[in-house]
Amino acid sequence: PPSSIAPRVIAVEKNASAVLYLRGLREREPSWRDRVAVVECDMRNSDRDPLLGPMGGNDESRKADVMVSELLGSFGDNELSPECLDGVQRCGLLKSHAISVPQSYRSYLAPVSSMRLHAEASAQAYSPSDPGDGPGGKPCGTLQAMETPYVVRSHAACQTHKEMPCWEFSHPRPLPNAGKGRGVGAGSEEDDDGGDNERRATLLFRHDPSHGAGCGPGYGPFDPAVAAMSASAAAASSEGG
Protein backbone atom coordinates (compact mmCIF):
# COMPACT_ATOMS: atom_id res chain seq x y z
CA PRO A 1 0.00 0.00 0.00
CA PRO A 2 1.11 3.64 -0.54
CA SER A 3 1.49 4.22 3.21
CA SER A 4 4.29 1.65 3.36
CA ILE A 5 6.48 3.61 0.94
CA ALA A 6 9.14 5.58 2.85
CA PRO A 7 10.18 8.74 1.00
CA ARG A 8 13.84 9.62 0.72
CA VAL A 9 14.62 13.28 1.38
CA ILE A 10 17.88 15.05 0.55
CA ALA A 11 18.32 18.44 2.22
CA VAL A 12 20.75 20.61 0.25
CA GLU A 13 22.15 23.63 2.12
CA LYS A 14 25.08 25.96 1.41
CA ASN A 15 25.11 27.91 4.69
CA ALA A 16 27.51 26.19 7.11
CA SER A 17 25.54 27.23 10.21
CA ALA A 18 22.29 25.93 8.74
CA VAL A 19 24.01 22.66 7.85
CA LEU A 20 24.99 22.14 11.50
CA TYR A 21 21.39 22.78 12.56
CA LEU A 22 19.99 20.33 10.00
CA ARG A 23 22.48 17.64 10.97
CA GLY A 24 21.53 18.16 14.60
CA LEU A 25 17.88 17.63 13.70
CA ARG A 26 18.80 14.47 11.86
CA GLU A 27 20.48 13.11 14.98
CA ARG A 28 17.68 14.10 17.37
CA GLU A 29 14.56 13.38 15.33
CA PRO A 30 13.78 9.67 14.82
CA SER A 31 11.67 10.49 11.76
CA TRP A 32 14.69 12.15 10.12
CA ARG A 33 17.36 9.61 10.98
CA ASP A 34 16.86 7.04 8.23
CA ARG A 35 15.04 9.22 5.71
CA VAL A 36 16.85 12.56 5.47
CA ALA A 37 20.36 13.05 4.10
CA VAL A 38 21.96 16.46 4.65
CA VAL A 39 24.29 17.66 1.88
CA GLU A 40 26.46 20.77 2.20
CA CYS A 41 26.96 22.26 -1.25
CA ASP A 42 25.82 24.93 -3.68
CA MET A 43 22.86 23.40 -5.51
CA ARG A 44 24.04 25.00 -8.74
CA ASN A 45 27.09 22.71 -8.55
CA SER A 46 25.32 19.72 -7.06
CA ASP A 47 26.63 17.36 -9.75
CA ARG A 48 30.08 17.67 -8.13
CA ASP A 49 28.87 16.31 -4.78
CA PRO A 50 29.65 12.61 -4.06
CA LEU A 51 26.04 11.88 -3.03
CA LEU A 52 24.21 14.02 -5.58
CA GLY A 53 26.55 13.56 -8.53
CA PRO A 54 25.40 10.00 -9.40
CA MET A 55 21.81 11.29 -9.62
CA GLY A 56 22.83 13.21 -12.73
CA GLY A 57 23.53 10.05 -14.71
CA ASN A 58 21.26 8.14 -17.07
CA ASP A 59 19.50 6.09 -14.39
CA GLU A 60 16.09 7.77 -14.12
CA SER A 61 15.20 5.83 -10.96
CA ARG A 62 17.93 7.61 -8.98
CA LYS A 63 16.68 11.10 -9.82
CA ALA A 64 14.36 13.28 -7.74
CA ASP A 65 10.57 13.29 -8.15
CA VAL A 66 9.92 16.55 -6.27
CA MET A 67 12.03 19.66 -5.72
CA VAL A 68 10.94 21.81 -2.74
CA SER A 69 12.60 25.17 -2.08
CA GLU A 70 12.23 28.23 0.15
CA LEU A 71 14.36 30.60 -1.93
CA LEU A 72 11.68 33.15 -2.76
CA GLY A 73 12.91 36.68 -2.22
CA SER A 74 11.13 39.96 -2.70
CA PHE A 75 10.53 41.85 -5.96
CA GLY A 76 13.06 40.79 -8.58
CA ASP A 77 13.72 37.49 -6.76
CA ASN A 78 16.77 38.78 -4.92
CA GLU A 79 17.54 35.40 -3.35
CA LEU A 80 18.47 33.87 -6.72
CA SER A 81 15.62 31.38 -6.76
CA PRO A 82 15.52 31.09 -10.60
CA GLU A 83 19.28 30.67 -10.93
CA CYS A 84 19.51 28.10 -8.13
CA LEU A 85 16.55 25.99 -9.24
CA ASP A 86 17.65 26.12 -12.87
CA GLY A 87 21.06 24.93 -11.66
CA VAL A 88 19.56 21.80 -10.11
CA GLN A 89 17.84 21.02 -13.38
CA ARG A 90 20.99 21.62 -15.44
CA CYS A 91 22.87 19.21 -13.17
CA GLY A 92 20.40 16.50 -14.23
CA LEU A 93 19.08 15.68 -10.76
CA LEU A 94 15.37 15.75 -11.68
CA LYS A 95 13.25 13.10 -13.34
CA SER A 96 11.61 14.00 -16.63
CA HIS A 97 8.22 14.25 -14.87
CA ALA A 98 9.54 15.97 -11.71
CA ILE A 99 7.57 18.81 -10.15
CA SER A 100 8.72 21.90 -8.28
CA VAL A 101 7.18 23.52 -5.19
CA PRO A 102 6.70 26.38 -5.81
CA GLN A 103 5.93 25.78 -9.46
CA SER A 104 5.91 29.45 -10.47
CA TYR A 105 6.05 32.97 -9.08
CA ARG A 106 5.28 36.34 -10.59
CA SER A 107 6.40 39.88 -9.72
CA TYR A 108 4.05 42.87 -9.81
CA LEU A 109 4.58 46.63 -9.70
CA ALA A 110 2.29 49.47 -8.62
CA PRO A 111 2.87 53.16 -7.80
CA VAL A 112 2.22 54.24 -4.22
CA SER A 113 1.92 57.56 -2.42
CA SER A 114 3.69 57.72 0.93
CA MET A 115 5.13 60.76 2.69
CA ARG A 116 6.88 58.49 5.17
CA LEU A 117 8.57 56.24 2.61
CA HIS A 118 9.61 59.27 0.55
CA ALA A 119 11.10 60.99 3.61
CA GLU A 120 12.95 57.88 4.78
CA ALA A 121 14.36 57.22 1.31
CA SER A 122 15.43 60.87 1.02
CA ALA A 123 17.22 60.63 4.38
CA GLN A 124 19.38 57.83 2.98
CA ALA A 125 21.10 60.46 0.81
CA TYR A 126 23.24 61.36 3.82
CA SER A 127 24.35 57.78 4.44
CA PRO A 128 27.87 56.79 3.32
CA SER A 129 28.16 55.30 -0.16
CA ASP A 130 30.30 52.55 1.34
CA PRO A 131 29.04 51.30 4.73
CA GLY A 132 32.61 50.38 5.60
CA ASP A 133 33.59 54.07 5.63
CA GLY A 134 31.58 54.71 8.79
CA PRO A 135 29.78 57.98 9.69
CA GLY A 136 32.53 60.09 8.12
CA GLY A 137 32.20 58.50 4.68
CA LYS A 138 31.14 60.33 1.54
CA PRO A 139 27.32 60.57 1.33
CA CYS A 140 25.69 58.54 -1.42
CA GLY A 141 23.60 61.53 -2.54
CA THR A 142 19.95 62.03 -3.41
CA LEU A 143 20.03 60.35 -6.83
CA GLN A 144 21.42 57.06 -5.52
CA ALA A 145 19.18 57.13 -2.44
CA MET A 146 15.98 57.66 -4.43
CA GLU A 147 16.81 55.10 -7.13
CA THR A 148 17.87 52.29 -4.79
CA PRO A 149 15.36 49.44 -4.24
CA TYR A 150 14.46 48.88 -0.58
CA VAL A 151 12.83 45.88 1.07
CA VAL A 152 10.09 47.35 3.28
CA ARG A 153 6.77 46.48 4.81
CA SER A 154 4.69 49.46 3.79
CA HIS A 155 2.24 50.22 6.60
CA ALA A 156 2.01 53.95 5.73
CA ALA A 157 1.44 53.90 1.98
CA CYS A 158 -1.50 54.36 -0.38
CA GLN A 159 -1.46 52.32 -3.58
CA THR A 160 -2.63 54.69 -6.32
CA HIS A 161 -3.11 52.21 -9.18
CA LYS A 162 -3.86 48.53 -9.58
CA GLU A 163 -0.70 46.45 -9.62
CA MET A 164 0.47 45.10 -12.99
CA PRO A 165 2.48 41.93 -13.67
CA CYS A 166 6.11 42.30 -14.73
CA TRP A 167 7.53 38.82 -15.22
CA GLU A 168 7.18 35.22 -14.17
CA PHE A 169 9.53 32.32 -13.46
CA SER A 170 8.40 28.69 -13.74
CA HIS A 171 10.13 25.46 -12.68
CA PRO A 172 11.21 23.09 -13.94
CA ARG A 173 11.73 24.58 -17.38
CA PRO A 174 11.38 22.51 -20.55
CA LEU A 175 14.96 21.59 -21.35
CA PRO A 176 14.89 22.52 -25.07
CA ASN A 177 13.83 26.05 -24.06
CA ALA A 178 15.80 26.33 -20.85
CA GLY A 179 16.69 29.94 -21.56
CA LYS A 180 13.30 31.15 -22.70
CA GLY A 181 11.18 33.05 -20.20
CA ARG A 182 7.96 34.84 -20.95
CA GLY A 183 6.91 38.41 -20.33
CA VAL A 184 3.46 38.80 -18.84
CA GLY A 185 3.15 42.55 -18.37
CA ALA A 186 1.50 44.90 -20.84
CA GLY A 187 4.28 46.04 -23.14
CA SER A 188 6.85 43.92 -21.33
CA GLU A 189 9.92 42.49 -22.99
CA GLU A 190 12.54 40.03 -21.88
CA ASP A 191 16.17 39.50 -22.66
CA ASP A 192 16.66 35.91 -23.78
CA ASP A 193 20.39 35.95 -24.40
CA GLY A 194 22.26 32.78 -23.55
CA GLY A 195 19.67 31.34 -21.20
CA ASP A 196 20.08 33.85 -18.37
CA ASN A 197 17.31 35.04 -16.08
CA GLU A 198 17.47 38.75 -16.82
CA ARG A 199 14.07 40.39 -17.17
CA ARG A 200 12.89 43.80 -18.36
CA ALA A 201 9.35 45.12 -18.25
CA THR A 202 7.81 48.39 -19.40
CA LEU A 203 4.52 49.23 -17.67
CA LEU A 204 2.17 52.15 -18.30
CA PHE A 205 0.12 53.54 -15.41
CA ARG A 206 -2.33 56.17 -16.65
CA HIS A 207 -2.80 59.33 -14.62
CA ASP A 208 -6.10 59.58 -12.76
CA PRO A 209 -6.95 63.29 -12.24
CA SER A 210 -9.53 62.37 -9.62
CA HIS A 211 -6.78 61.07 -7.34
CA GLY A 212 -5.29 63.94 -5.36
CA ALA A 213 -2.17 62.18 -4.09
CA GLY A 214 1.16 62.44 -5.83
CA CYS A 215 3.04 59.31 -6.79
CA GLY A 216 6.33 58.56 -5.14
CA PRO A 217 8.00 55.14 -5.04
CA GLY A 218 6.80 51.90 -6.58
CA TYR A 219 5.52 48.90 -4.66
CA GLY A 220 6.42 45.42 -5.91
CA PRO A 221 4.72 42.37 -4.39
CA PHE A 222 4.67 38.91 -5.96
CA ASP A 223 2.40 35.87 -5.86
CA PRO A 224 3.95 32.42 -5.54
CA ALA A 225 1.84 29.58 -6.89
CA VAL A 226 2.00 27.88 -3.50
CA ALA A 227 -1.28 29.49 -2.41
CA ALA A 228 -3.15 28.11 -5.42
CA MET A 229 -1.64 24.67 -4.93
CA SER A 230 -2.61 24.71 -1.23
CA ALA A 231 -6.18 25.65 -2.10
CA SER A 232 -6.38 22.82 -4.64
CA ALA A 233 -4.99 20.34 -2.12
CA ALA A 234 -7.47 21.48 0.54
CA ALA A 235 -10.37 21.14 -1.90
CA ALA A 236 -9.27 17.64 -2.92
CA SER A 237 -8.92 16.65 0.72
CA SER A 238 -12.42 17.85 1.61
CA GLU A 239 -13.91 16.03 -1.37
CA GLY A 240 -12.14 12.82 -0.45
CA GLY A 241 -13.18 13.06 3.21
Image (tube, grey):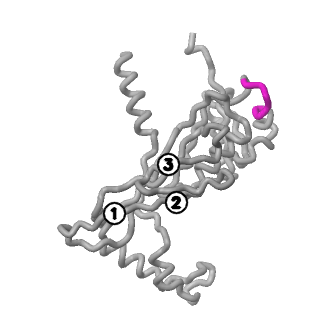
Magenta residue check for 57: yes
Residue drawn at 64 percent across, 42 percent down: 177
Proximity of marks 2 and 1: CB atoms separated by less than 8 Å: no
Secondary structure under tag 1 reads loop
Q: Which residue is mark 2?
A: 200
Query: Residue 191, image x and y in percent?
Result: 59, 57
Secondary structure under tag 2 reads loop
- Residue numbers of the magenta segment: 55-60
Proximity of marks 1 and 3: CB atoms separated by less than 8 Å: no
Q: Which residue is mark 1?
A: 205
Residue drawn at 42 percent across, 76 percent down: 121
Q: Which mark is residue 49?
A: none
Query: Residue 133, image x and y in percent?
Result: 62, 84
Query: Residue 189, image x and y in percent?
Result: 51, 56
Nearer the observer: mark 3 or 2; the answer is 2
- In-image side of 174 versus 49 (left or right): left
